[in-house]
Amino acid sequence: MGLRLDLHVHSKASFDSLLDIPTIIRVAKNRGLGGVAITDHNTAEGVFKALSDGTKREDDGFLLIPGIEFSTDKGHVLGLFIEREPEVSAEKGSLLPFESAVRAVHDAKGIAVLAHPYQIRAVIQQECFDGHGGDFCDALEAFNSRAPIVRNPRANLQADSYAKLHRLPVTGGSDAHFAWEIGRGGCVIGDLSPSFGGAEVKEAILEGRAVTFGRPSLRAAKPLSGLVGAMRRGQYSSIPRYALRVALALLGPVGDRLEDALRGRRL
Ligand SMILES: [Zn+2]
Ligand SMILES: [Zn+2]
C-alpha cells in the first residue's frame, strides 16, 4: 500500500485555521495516512513547538513533517522538511520576493514546492523552475484539493500536465484548514512505509517517486476559512461578505450562478 501522505495542512498557527496539531495527527491516522506536513502561512512556529514540547511522540509511527507556506510575488511556495524556521522578511505591505522565499527554504535544508500553481494564475512563470542559476522550486504540487474550487476547475489537471511535460517531481496535499479536509488529497510513495524517516521520504520525493491522489474539497471550504480568518483578525466588517459566500457555495449550482452575477459588485 505504501506510505500515504498529506503534504499541505494548516494548523491554528495559520490565521485562517483552528486545527491543533494533536487533532491533525489523530484524524490523519484514522484516515490511513502515515504522515502529514504542517504548512502554516508564513510561519513554522506551531510545528516546531509540537516537535519540541512532546505534543508529537517520536515513537508513534507517524511522520510529522515541518513545513511552511510562503505567499510570494510568483504565487504560493511550500517549504517541506525544513530543519528550522526559514529566515526571510518582506517589506511592509508587499509580498515576499519568490527567490528570497525559495532561498530561505533551501537555507533551512528544506525542499521548495510551487503550490497550487493554476488556482488563480493562468501560467507558471519560467523562473519558478529555471535551472540556470538562482533559486528555484524543486517540485510542483500537482494535486491540491482546494485548487479546483477557487476559480479554475482544471487547476490540478493543468498542474499535473506541466509536471509531466517538464519531468518535475510532484507532491500532493489537501490544503486542509478544517478536520474534514485532512487526507482529501495527498501523495503516496509505493515503496516506503510509515516507519521510514523524513530523510528517506524527502529523497523519494526529489527522485520523483511520489504519486498524487485525491478529490476536490467542498466549495464552501474556502469562504469558511476566510470567515475564520476575518473573525480571528477582528475584521468584523468583512464577516457578512464571507458568510454570504459560504451560503452561496452551499447552494451548489444555483449559488454558483448567483455568485457569478454578483462578482461584478466585488462579492
Ligand atoms: Zn496557498
Ligand atoms: Zn495552503
Image (cartoon, helix red, strand yellow):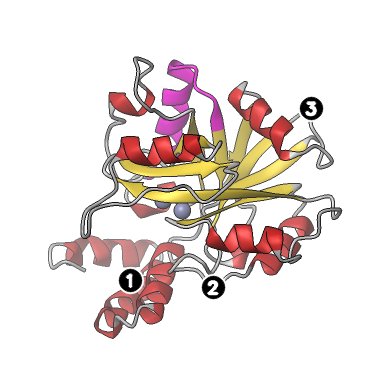
- Picture residue at 35% right of the left edge, 76% below the top: 230
- Percent x, y for residue 193? 82, 37
Q: Nearer the viewer, mark 1 or mark 3?
A: 3
Q: Position of residue 222 (x, y in %)?
A: 41, 63
Q: Which residue is mark 3?
A: 191
Magenta residue span: 153-170
Q: Nearer the viewer, residue 257 or 104?
A: 104
Residue type (three-letter) at the residue carrying disc 3: Asp
Q: Which mark is residue 245?
A: 1
What is the distance, in whole Å, between disc 1 and disc 3 at their CAs?
43 Å
Bin the neighbour count of mark 3 within 10 Å (Cα to Cα): few under 14, some 14-19, many 20 and up: few
Classify mark 3: helix, strand or loop: loop
What's the residue at 75%, 29% (across, down)?
190
Is 143 displayed left or right of 1 in the figure? Answer: left
| Near-viewer residue (161 or 105) | 105
Locate the C terminus and report the quarter of the image it occupies.
bottom left
The percent position of residue 211, horizontal first and vertical second, equals 63, 30
The residue type indicated by label 2 comes to Leu
